[in-house]
Image (cartoon, rainbow, N blue to C red):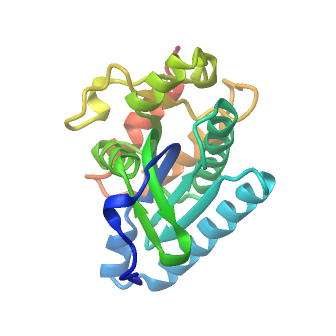
Amino acid sequence: MEHDNNLDFAKIKYTERWFAHLDLMGFSNLVVKGGIDDVLEAYEKALEALEEKVAIHKGSGVSHTWFSDTFLIFSQGKSEEEFKIVEQITRLFFQQLIYNKIPVRGAITYGGFYSQKRKNLFVGPALVDSYQYGEDQKWVGLIITPSAVKQLDDLSASELYKSYFPIPSTVMRKKHSSIIRGYKFQHGRINRARNGLVESLKEMMSVAPEDVKPKYQLAIEFATEDS
């Protein structure tokens, strides 16, 4: 990371924004075990999927970046419209990864955030909140954190998270789950006969190590239970 000696961190103004953080699961283990071909293939697919989704909203002011197995998507401001765009890009990216059999977990949040892509500088409570809620999950999944839910409620825009549902208490390790909302792996119209995202989860679970299978099972049960 570059450093600017003229940058006064005390004067950084944090802007309230919508922020999403996604991690590719099992990525580090692949690297350690020497599965570099699998790592590169997964990473290439992930980048292609992200660029495709971001291109849909070119000019909207929503930004994205990545490093290692982590992807960040964030708005310039705090409007309802910006939430819609961040949520859509994040959700479509998440879906594409699942369809490509790449396990991922993520969180959409709201809070103060400072970014300067030119200097690769990203600072703020929104990043910390999203990261903590992302890491705390014990499943393959995408959630909306309490801070984002509260902000949407304050904007009288709770309809914007209507496709996200309360999650089971078993999903989180330490975080209190009652206000957290989870994505139900729905893509367009719900087809109970066959859900391609759930089918992908089942295929990934079938080849996953035994100690990892519960992460898929939790997500499958959540996706298939009646809301």
Q: Pick whichever, 44 or 152, lies toward us.
A: 152
Q: Determine whether 68 is above or below 211 in the image.
A: below
- Residue 66 in the image: state x and y as whole percent: 51, 68
| Residue 104 visible within the image | no
Q: Is residue 133 left or right of residue 156?
A: left
| Residue 83 visible within the image | yes
Q: Is residue 183 left or right of residue 70?
A: right
Q: Determine whether 196 is above or below 159 in the image.
A: below
Which residue occupies 71% across, 57% down?
Answer: 54
Which residue occupies 69% across, 26% down?
Answer: 193
- Residue 184 in the image: state x and y as whole percent: 55, 30
- Residue 63 in the image: state x and y as whole percent: 62, 58
Q: Would you identify the image quadrant in which residue 45 lies?
A: bottom right
Which residue occupies 61% across, 40% down?
Answer: 87
Q: Which quadrant of the figure contains the N terminus?
A: bottom left
Q: Would you identify the image quadrant in which residue 163 lies?
A: top right
Q: Is residue 210 left or right of residue 30?
A: left
Q: Is residue 187 left or right of residue 6?
A: right
Which residue occupies 37% across, 42% down?
Answer: 139
Total of numbered circles in the picture? 0
Q: Pick whichever, 203 or 110, lies toward us.
A: 110
